Amino acid sequence: MNRFYSQTTQRLNANVANHLIEEKFKNTAPFLENGDVNVELFDDVMHDMMAVNRAIEVYLLDIEGVVLHSVVLDHSDEFEPIKKVDLIPIREFIKNKNEYILGDDPKNTSERKIFSAASFNNNGKQGYIYVLLASHDFEQICTSLFKSYFSKLTITTICITTFLSLVVGFLSIFFISKSLLIIIHHVNNFKEGNLQSRIPEASTTNLSILATTFNEMADTIAYHIEEIKSINNFKKELIANISHDLRTPLTIIRGYAETLSGNEIKMTKENRQDFLKIIEKSTFILSDLVNQLYEYSNLDAKELQLNKTKFNLPKLINEIVMRYGMISENKEISIKVICKLDENQFVFGDKLLIERVIQNILDNALKFTPQKGCITLSLETKLDKIIVSIKDSGLGITKTELDSVLDRWYTSGNTIESRGLGLAISKKIIELHGTHLMIFSEGKNKGSEFMFSLPNTTKLIN
């Protein structure tokens, strides 16, 4: 700010020294005939100029920069050292008056001031008129006023800043407290059991990070609670289903065992043999149920390690169908294989587990397909996958049952007979292979289709 004021003042008064020479030296010489300074002339000039502007100080310099006369220095003191002004800034100023140049202050040579200067040559006398545009006293007054102004400005600024800070602080506390109360309200609702309680527009609140974090935490907790409920429901259903499925073979075994051990009942050798066969069959059913339960628990805990190899899928399908030939004939159900692959087409997977999947699906199809029905196994290539499809003409599955038919120990509403864990085990095995077991049905009594895929490999020759 001071530099701007000084530069402006110097630019406006750059020609003051020139005007003084042109006006006052035109008719009157600055020096007397004996070579002394025309003190009367300079005193009148300087007093006139300083009367108009008290900030101005006028000096008469000789050709070497020595102060010859002024009204601000005491020239009567013979012991006062000769004042000399540096001429370099003066010469630079005369060459270019548009530049911002500071010169010496004869009253205080350690300071630099703005000035106006001009050279003169009168009657063989040469020198300079040197005009300080801001005297020492003027600068002291300016400094004092500036300090006073700055002090008042500082106090005002502090007061305004303090007021604005209080207002902003109050508003911030108000809005933050409001957001905090909303968060506390929803936290209490959630704590009291309302698992759907969420902070609305969490990302736009003043405490967006806290609100968003609570919503995410609430979602996670609610998800896990629902999962725990689902597990508890499954445990109840599992116990009920296991009890139901185990009760029948156990009741048969117990009943026929008691009959065989009874002494009061006369039994022929043929009847005894029939009873033993029934007990043996029930034992096999009971053992199979226990094995299924053990196998599913291992798959559910992901403890099973896959032993993936390349194997001939069409060959495996034909071997399984041959094994089921006698069973299907006894039930008067036909099994067909439609293979759109090369006989030597190989796939990549765990052969024993894939065999178990196909067997489980075939067992289910044979269980729910009526006499004169048909089961079709088809193989085809789709992109880099081999699609395996097993379709039957059995009882079918309604739309409401499609989502749950692969669940653990699902019992169809069409029959009191349980599907056991076979399909659930198959689903787990296929998921371990990185794909999904899909099921399709057009409805009741329209059959079902189970489908899964396996990675295709290069064709190999046996």
Image (cartoon, rainbow, N blue to C red):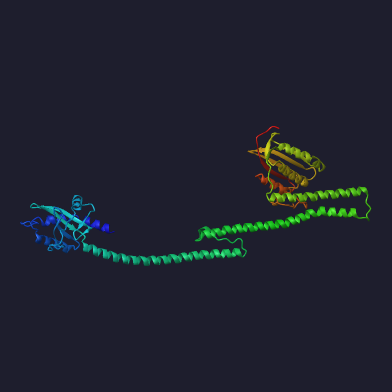
Q: Residue at x 73, y 56 (%)?
A: 237
Number of numbered discs on residues: 0
Position of 196 with respect to 157 (left or right) is right
Residue 441 seen in the current view: no
Q: Residue at x 76, y 49 (%)?
A: 291
| Coordinates of residue 15 in the picture (x, y in percent) | 18, 55
| Coordinates of residue 461 in the picture (x, y in percent) | 69, 32
Judged from this view, the residue extending furthest toward the left is 33
Q: Residue at x 60, y 64 (%)?
A: 191
Position of 366 with respect to 125 (left or right) is right
Position of 456 with respect to 78 (left or right) is right
Residue 170 seen in the current view: yes
Is 10 located above or below residue 331 in the figure? below
Q: Nearer the viewer, residue 122 or 340?
A: 122
Residue 117: quadrant of the picture: bottom left
Q: Nearer the viewer, residue 56 or 207?
A: 56
Q: Residue at x 70, y 44 (%)?
A: 450
Q: Nearer the viewer, residue 78 or 418?
A: 78
Q: Nearer the viewer, residue 94 or 59?
A: 59
Is 144 located above or below residue 298 in the figure? below
Residue 51: quadrant of the picture: bottom left
Position of 252 with respect to 435 (left or right) is right
Residue 236: quadrant of the picture: bottom right
Judged from this view, the residue extending furthest toward the front is 79
Quadrant containing the C terminus is top right
| Coordinates of residue 120 in the picture (x, y in percent) | 12, 53
| Coordinates of residue 433 in the picture (x, y in percent) | 66, 44
Judged from this view, the residue extending furthest toward the top is 461
Quadrant containing the N terminus is bottom left
Is 461 located above or below residue 40 in the figure? above
